[in-house]
Image (cartoon, helix red, strand yellow):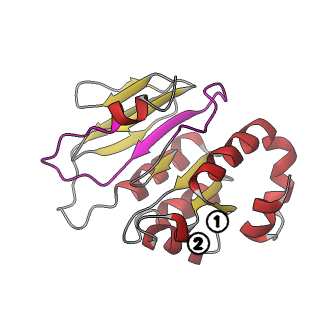
Amino acid sequence: MTSGRNASTGATPADLGLAYVVVVHLAPDRKSELPSILSRHTRMPMVQVGDQREEPLLPDHVYVIAPDRELLITDSAVGVKPFEQPRGHRMAIDLMFRSLAEARGEGFAVVFSGTGSDGVAGAKAVKSRGGVILVQEPSSAAYGEMPRAVIATGLADVVLPVRELARRLAELARNRPKLLPMLDADTGPEAVAESR
């Protein structure tokens, strides 16, 4: 599951068996072009999750949040609802990551470029359920605040530039049983990023 401004699935294989849920901070009155942008970089089906119904959460699909909505994940579906918080106090990425942790347990949380600290509380929730936290290297991000905030918690398992992050996500998804002991050890993100 991913969040941020410049998430790209272009280097991620389309057959890992993962569902990709993309949450970005969008102005409520702006139409999102993200589904059409991402569809140029992946063969996976692209679904914009709107208000009409929940969408079944299927492997090898990409789900993109509609503007001005909170995204929720259940054990078998993804849906949206209007925000309860006023603008300026919404933590869309935290809400989605918490939803992921509660509904699916172990999962991957990926934090890309963004401002503020949205994602920190959600990353803690995912990590507490045995999930893996991947973060874009802040120096490679257009906005490094969000990645830095998550890294500062000490919870990041992997910190890499975007393209390398996609490759590492694929490795983790394919080799998760072998890599979990290494991630559980107190090695820090740099050791995990350098391991093969």
**Helix, strand or loop status at disc 2:** helix
> In screen coordinates, is 68 left or right of 129?
left
The residue where tag 2 is placed is 151
In the rendering, at what x and y percent does residue 100 appear? 51, 45
Mark 2 closeness class: few <14, some 14–19, many ≥20 residues within 10 Å: many
Q: Residue at x 12, y 47 (%)?
A: 29
Q: Pinpoint residue 187: horizontal percent, then vertical percent.
A: 82, 70
Q: Which residue is mark 1?
A: 156
Q: Mark 2 touching mark 1, by CB under 8 A?
A: yes
**Is the stretch drawn in magenta largely helix, strand or loop?**
loop
Q: Residues within 10 Å of mark 1 (few under 14, many from 20)?
A: many
Magenta region: 9-34
| 166 lies left or right of 150 | right
Q: Amino acid at mark 1?
A: Ala
**Which residue is at the front of the view, 71 or 160?**
160
Assess whether residue 10 is covered by the magenta stretch.
yes
Of 195 and 71, nearer the camera is: 195
